[in-house]
Amino acid sequence: MTERTTHPPTGAGALPLDLDTMRASARRLLAEDAEPPRQEELETLTLTLRGHMMLLIPAVEDAARKFPRDDIPATCARACVGEARMRLGLEPRNGLPAGIAHAQRLSRSVNALCDHVINLVGESR
């Protein structure tokens, strides 16, 4: 399988985003046939998802900044960034089920941020 890499419009030295790998991490918890992770695996996955979000948020912000304030896709992207930042600030409650639910919310944010990178940076706009 080939990996898709997107170069967001960020400053010099910015790393390309590996959206396929980021989406694969998100699918680990969101797929219909996903097996519940063990506690150790969940901790690693949660940290991975948080790292993906920390890379995606500035890329989406930079891309949205290039569009007028009234541009609907860019406005949606800005709202997604706000929600992602809020989710980064939350700590899961104790217990494996609560940790899984928290990581699933992070996974949905990763997927949405990947979508916004593609929509705002892609050739179609």
Image (cartoon, rainbow, N blue to C red):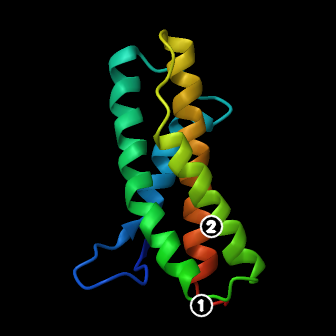
Q: Could you tell me how many numbered marks the image carries? A: 2
Residue 28 in the image: above or below residue 23: above
Q: Position of residue 89 (x, y in %)?
A: 47, 39
Residue kind at label 2, given as amino acid type: Arg
Q: Which residue is mark 2?
A: 78
Q: Relative to 97, is 123 above or below?
A: below
Q: Does label 2 or label 1 sit earlier along the sequence?
A: 2
Q: Is residue 73 above or below residue 98?
A: below
Viewer-proximal residue among 71 and 119: 71
Q: Residue 24 placed where, x, y %?
A: 48, 48
Local packing at callout 2 (Cα closer than 10 Å; few below 14, some 14-19, many 20+) is many
* 36 sits to left or right of 45: right
- Taking the image as drawn, is residue 27 in sight? no
Q: Can you identify the residue that label 1 sits on?
A: 123
* Front: mark 2 or 1: 2
Amino acid type at image mark 1? Glu
Measuring from the top left, give residue 102's x and y in whole percent: 55, 29
**Going 41% across and 34% down the picture, which residue do you hit?**
46
Q: Quadrant of the C terminus?
A: bottom right
Q: Is residue 80 above or below residue 74?
A: above
Q: Residue furthest left?
A: 13
Give 47 or 29, whichever is nearer the viewer: 47
Asked which quadrant contains residue 49, the reply is top left
Tell me where residue 4 sits by quadrant.
bottom left
Q: State the CA–CA distance, disc 2 to disc 1.
A: 20 Å
Of all residues shown, which one is farthest toward the top? Answer: 95
Quadrant in the picture for residue 59: bottom left
Q: Is residue 45 left or right of residue 27?
A: left
Residues 119 and 81: in front is: 81
